[in-house]
Amino acid sequence: MKSFNPAKLVGLLLTLTFATPLRAQAPVRPVSALAVTAENRTAVAAAARGAKRSDATVHAGDVLRYKLTFTNTAGRPVRQVALQNPVASGLQFVGGSAQSSRQDARAEYSADNGVSWSARPMETVMIDGKRIERAIAAERYTSVRWIVDGWVPAGATVTAQFEARLATR
Amino acid sequence: MSTISTRTRARAPRISRWLTVGAIAFLTTLATAQIAAAQATPEGTVITNTATASYTDANGNTYTAATASVSVTVGFVAGIDVTSPATVSPASPSTGNLLNFTVNNTGNGIDTVGTVSSTAAAGLTITGYRIGATNYATLAALQTALNAISIVSGGNVVVTVVYDVATAQGGATLPITFTATSKRTPATTDTSSTNVTPATARGVVTTPDAFAISHLPSNGTNYTYGFSVQNTGNASDTYNLVASVPGAVITVVSVNGTAGSSGTVTIASGATATVNVIYSIGNVAAGSTETLTLTATSQGNPAATDPGSLNVTVVRAALTMAKVAYRDNQSTIINNTTDRVLPGEFIQYRITVTNGGGASATSVSITDALPAAVTYVSAAGDVGADWAISQVTGTVTANLTPALASSTSRFIWIRVQVK
């Protein structure tokens, strides 16, 4: 008679128990998985100096800080989390302002409306007939995104922020 | 000149015409973006920032990307930029000159010019202002008009300053400024300054021209003539002075204090200077002539030059003398052919000296050795006080104190008795 190994059975059941629901899991539509806020850093600084603005409008030259907050509402760990934010028309990305709460979040930029991405977008220019490669000025970035390499636990949040200046002219 | 073209390295470069097309398309997009970025975002614009989050789970399930947006509204920021030409060059003097100041609304919303001010350097006089074809006599009137004009963002209003330029301002730098403020944000103001630099005009007039003058030969005495040199230009100028003569009658000694035949003089615009030319006349015959020319030439513009001249005629005194015998009545002439005198008769000689030359004769002296057949009795001049008459052993000497002018005559009477 063939002997029965209880430990092997338990391992199989565990596999079925967890694997099946995951495969059968249909993508859910989380509620408020992403929130974004804007803060006028220039107005805040002015208020700190006692020059409070009379209204909440933004003025040319003001620096706005956009903060993106992603909350994993999927009920399970998720990965390949990408937070993407086009720079709205009229705004100029402030170089070096991209930050994230996750150390494993890579910031990338696009200067061509999301067609290509790079941590340091480059361009080739012809100056006096010579081809020269140079970095694109941050002010010309059209989008910024963060790609989180690791897992984001269920219920955890990932925040990212960048600053953009309202073009003066 | 450097030329710059750009192409973004979107991916690893591949040689194909499609890349070229793509690059051009991107460049077009980029250029548009830069132009857009170069414009201030209009007041009231709502800027909506939308973020997207995407993710997968352990099994590779994808989820509907989450999006979130936040909006901000652009407020009003005033911007005033007054522009004008760097320099303008009207004439000096001139009137009714026009200078445009363009008040640009560089803010991001409709604005109005609040206060305005204007200044003009000495030598300029602002006589009025214009907006289009409408004249405003005062700055206050101009300001009232501007207060009623709404200027859209990126628009402008042109204010014309009407001004006069005074005389003698050639080459000067005379700024006119115009300041405008935002009515919505009075702290926002801008000033533009234009340097009015009237063109320098050079001119000179030297007088007299062909002025006739007579001189004796110098005989050690130099002559001085003051020419008038007038600066008819609109700026102070220094003139080169050259005195010239074609022959040897005149020798130039100095010009305006400088030995030799040349010198300089600096004259303010519109002023006249007297330039003394010192010269001598050679020991030449009466009637000799020569022209002394003084030419003043602007150092600022050698084409501005003008001569003045003297026509010098050399003159000398030329005396002639006549001696006529009269009866003692001083009216009846004794004709040596028909008349006779008798021993013991008193007769009188009238000696007349005439200056037929062109110059006065000084120290005129008559000496008359009486004939042996007569005895000196007395002598008198035509005007007693003018003559000093003496007689020594039959020789009469009469010295005329005043000069004997050209073309004049003087005479004396000598009374004698026939032996």
Image (cartoon, coloured by chain):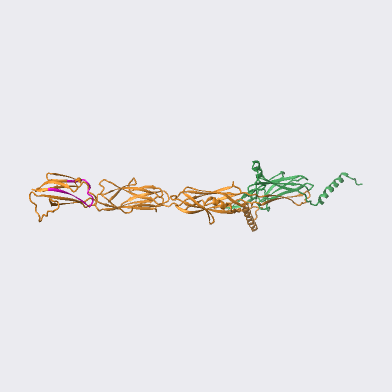
Left or right relative to B257: residue A45: right
Closest to the observer, A10 or B351? B351
The residue at the point 48 percent across, 54 percent down is B96
Question: Is B278 one of the magenta-colored residues?
Answer: no
**Residue B266 locus on image (x, y percent):** 39, 47
**Residue B248 locus on image (x, y percent):** 28, 51
Closest to the observer, B170 or B137? B137
Chain coloured orange here: B
Question: Is B401 one of the magenta-colored residues?
Answer: yes
Closest to the observer, A11 or B183? B183
Colour of chain A in the image: green
Q: How many marks?
A: 0
Left or right relative to B256: residue B408: left
**Residue B346 locus on image (x, y percent):** 10, 49
| Extreme residue in the front direction | B329
**Residue B374 locus on image (x, y percent):** 10, 48
Left or right relative to B258: residue A74: right
| Extreme residue in the right direction | A1
Magenta segment's dominant SS is strand
Residues in magenta, as a range: B398-415
- Which corner quadrant of the image does residue A52 belong to? top right
| Extreme residue in the top direction | A49
Closest to the observer, A40 or B136? B136
